[in-house]
Image (cartoon, rainbow, N blue to C red):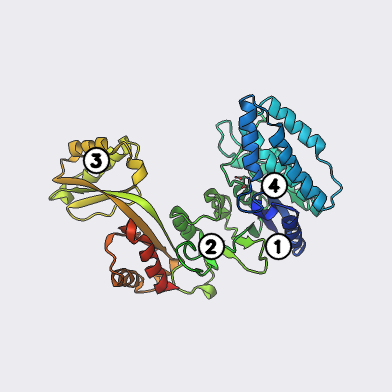
Amino acid sequence: MDLKVSKFGGSSLADAEQFKKVYNIIKADDARRYVVPSAPGKRFSGDTKVTDMLYECYERSAEGASFEELFNKITERYNGIISDLGLDMDLSDEYEVIRSAFRVKAGRDYAASRGEYLNGKILAKYLGYDFIDAADVVFFNASGTFDSAATYDMLGEVLKQHERAVIPGFYGSMPNDTIKTFSRGGSDITGSIVARAVNADLYENWTDVSGFLMADPRIIDSPRSIDYITYHELRELSYMGATVLHEEAVFPVRKVGIPINIRNTNKPEEKGTMIVTEVPASIEKGHITGIAGKKGFSVVIIEKDMMNNELGFGRRVLLAFEKNGISFEHLPSGIDTMSVVVSTKALENKKEQLLKEIKDLVEPDHIYVENGLALIAVVGRGMVRTKGTASKIFTAISDNDINIKMIDQGSSELNIIIGVAEDDFEKAMKAIYAQFK
Ligand code: ASP
């Protein structure tokens, strides 16, 4: 039998109605043996996530202010779910432990982690699954980084003894037994870790969208959804701002080739997006996978005759960036020009010093900065085999009277990145999408 690890996000477990959908999904497939929940998320726009309420409670207790009223709102949310589901369950003792811990200021991460902990208790009871506290099986080093070796050993061993279990997401414990969380949205990471520890056939990540879309729906009208995407392509698109999954969630499963399936709890009949190492040949279509982009970039342009003959030129330019703590995004260069693309924010308050250092280090003929650049990445493994992708992009852009300010194609032929003026960004995205939809 296949083995699936299923992670459910905050909106999938925001109230009893959502819990019922999750129940039906899990009971529909016997392979869904390990379940990783987030804390209850927003029930409607304008609502507050339980995690945010817990952070707020912590801030109040740390300042010595009263947090009781807010804490009661949290317990009301859980009690509401319990009673709406008709569960025979009372979490009063748990609430009391948490309340006392708040009083002695048990820590910000401890506070936040209780959202997943309590939700996990309820979900385990509702499903009839065992509950495993993540603090006993997910470990961090004393420095606060994830301890993969200790975690995989322990999780693998413990889960062997539980046929079906709920393991709350987002947190684990430190060597001194205090609670530590991953960064926000980190239940995605826990799900991936559990999938790796039990060597699952599939890691399902259930959320409120049916996977990744080919382009940002705020710019493109009803873009097509992506059926299959490789881990590599996903990295490229996420870097440009396409977010559905926590960035770090791909690493544990990617190493051992476990695919991730992004699914929609509210539309379980849709197949969602499969994230895989390699797309099966029978499914390959050859067109591009997605388009993503961002505004807010600047280019530092350095010109000097015969630059190409000057040994160490590039290294010295980049040294100036490094010394100023600015990391660069792209480096499209010509024979006598070098351009360094950085985020405009990274240049803030550092521009004068940076330019001075570059001047001292390489004595350029000209050096100047252009702001207001937007980058668009056209990503697709299919580019390697399909001719004419670049020409389609550039025709689309020039037919729309848009000036291309920069072009960068990685040698892996996985993406083409173009720079346009920020004012042309939306128009360029639409023009490119129209060529590939
Ligand atoms: N509840 C946590 C957050 O809101 C973690 C998660 O949902 O993945 O960030």
Closer to the camera in the image, 152 or 394: 394
x then y, percent, for residue 355: 23, 39
Q: Residue at x 84, y 45 (%)?
A: 89
Q: Where does label 2 land, which residue? A: 212
Name the element at disc 2.
Answer: loop
Q: What residue is pinned by disc 4?
A: 156
Alpha-carbon span between mark 2 and mark 4: 31 Å
Q: Which of marks 2 and 1 is in front?
A: 2
Does residue 293 appear to the left or right of 366 in the view shown? right
C-beta proximity under 8 Å, tags 1 and 4: no
Residue type at tag 3 = Arg
Pointer 2 local density, CA inside 10 Å: few below 14, some 14–19, many at least 20 = many
Sequence-first tag of 2 and 3: 2
Q: How far apart are marks 1 and 4 (CA)?
A: 17 Å
The circle on residue 2 is 1
**Mark 2 vs 1, N-terminal side:** 1
Label 1 near ligand 1 (CB < 8 Å): no
Residue lying at 66% horizontally and 41% vertically, measured from the top left? 138
Q: Which of label 2 and label 4 is nearer to you?
A: 2
Q: Residue at x 31, y 52 (%)?
A: 372
| In-front residue for pair 133/399 | 399
